[in-house]
Amino acid sequence: MQIKLYDSVKKQKCDFVSLKEKEVRFYVCGPTVYDHAHLGHARSSIVFDLWRRLFIANDYKVCFAKNFTDIDDKIIKKIQDSQNTHQGDVYAHLQSLTARYIDSYLHDMNALGVLRPDLEPKATQSLQSIVSMIESLLHKGYAYKGENNDVYLSIAKDSRYGSLSKHNQDHTKSRIESASDKLESKDFALWKGYKGKGDIGYESSLGKGRPGWHIECSAMIEQHLAYEDCEYRIDIHAGGADLLFPHHENEASQTRCATDKELAKYWLHNGFVNINGEKMSKSLGNSFFVKDALRIYHGEILRNYLLGTHYRLVLDFNEQDLLVSKKRLDKLYRLKKRIKPSLLCVLDIRNADEIHTHWGQYAPKANTEFLTQCLQALSDDLNISKTLSVIEEMISSANEHLDKNPKDNTFMQETAYNLVVIELLLGIGALDSTAYFQLGVDEATKARIESLIAQRLEAKKQKDFALADSIREDLRAMGIEIMDTPQGTMWEKQAH
């Protein structure tokens, strides 16, 4: 299946052609770990998780990397603002703080069904490669030293600076600091010399200091992903739309100057998440942490909602739309509930290799037309609306068939394989259907429900139908609907 993607540099959809046959080296800019993950992080992670799954389904060998920025001005400020930090403990506090937020981020992404990257480099563990790249830039004359061990890249020396974002170089963007020792205000820091008490610095051949934000990704790519014999260092570089300039522009410039090669053949960017019509921003006070959302909604429900808007568009987050999208997920689980348990394929996906294995095992057994339509839609720059339309049509026609042929095991089995295709491609539909419709009910309430159901069963045995009806009404008042089936009394949490 030919994959088409929208390249942010060319500003058009292109046929994807990998640098090496059936291999993809894919790098995504990860979080700066000074706080918990927000919905912008969640959306970006889900978007590029979908891209990764699509490449695997198309039989590509994917090496997928996402970094952690664990040394940065924002992290240092958080340490300095802490009331319980004592001088001398700053490095231990840095490690403790960033480890805490990395663990929080990984927990949230796991809850959202995002596959762990193959590589998760950290800035503090990549200092040698960062210093080596800066030394190369100094040696080639693209970088220069300022005061107090600061090192800057002179963008005037890079004739192609701006070719990535087409952005005016006379900018005043974030993380391009003003400094008296710069030759030009638009030059950016590669290395920040140690400023004394309250700062953090590492000994190096450049002097004591720490890396600038932009150099980290370029150096990590060189260390972990770069092709040796290709005109580009990697196939795909990705991140949020806010990173295109200046971050990705500066990355591209550094790599071009240091290696005489372009950083990536394709650049992918996902759109913002807005809340109440404003771009999500901590400075606006409307950031919505993933951990808070997960207290209310299961990760798969959030994932289903966040993937439902095309990845390049702005997503206006609101709970009304989330509940509408949940109804779409409900339909999938209603169909899954109609399939005999013995025919369902229970997967336990823990990593990308298992996606590849399960795809080869189950996808060929799915309905050919359904499989082809799903792949065609996703391969067209992740056309999610078309993909979801194909899925809804499959669910509708499957229900119609089962209404007329409720014991058609052959059809049920094919439908079970269709559900596997959805799970592997989109990362939804993995839960047990009974458990899905009981989401949001705590263990104590579950125990009370089961007790009431047992009392109702005993009342029916005693032919006390008035009591049985009364118990049903009590359960309804709790927001619980019960269904008497040949397998016993089942219950579900009522829909909103």
Image (tube, rainbow, N blue to C red):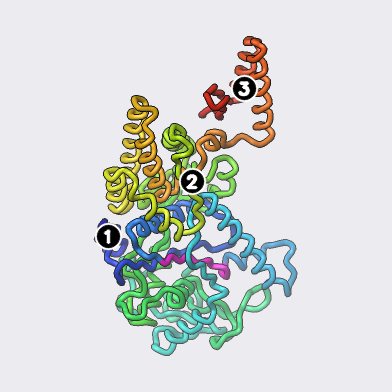
According to the image, label 1 marks what residue?
11
Seen at 48% across and 84% down, the residue is 132
Amino acid at circle 1? Lys
According to the image, label 3 marks what residue?
475
Disc 3 vs disc 1: Cβ atoms closer than 8 Å? no
Element carrying mark 3: helix
Q: Earlier in the sequence, mark 3 or mark 2?
A: 2
Percent x, y for residue 130? Answer: 50, 79
Element carrying mark 1: loop
Amino acid at circle 3? Leu
Percent x, y for residue 397? Answer: 32, 32
Seen at 48% across and 63% down, the residue is 117
Tag shown at residue 346:
2
| Circle 3 or circle 1, nearest the eye | 3
Q: Earlier in the sequence, mark 1 or mark 2?
A: 1
| Circle 3 or circle 2, nearest the eye | 2
| Circle 1 or circle 2, nearest the eye | 2
The answer to whether residue 312 is left or right of residue 333 is: left
Q: Residue furthest bottom?
A: 139
Depth check: give the residue in front, 433 or 42: 433
Disc 1 vs disc 2: Cβ atoms closer than 8 Å? no
Does residue 437 sit above or below 453 in this rendering? below
| Cα separation between marks 3 and 1 | 56 Å
Percent x, y for residue 84? Answer: 74, 63
**Does the magenta portion include 315?**
no
Q: Hey, which quadrant is residue 141 in on the image?
A: bottom left
Amino acid at circle 2? Val
Disc 3 vs disc 2: Cβ atoms closer than 8 Å? no
Depth check: give the residue in front, 374 or 87: 374
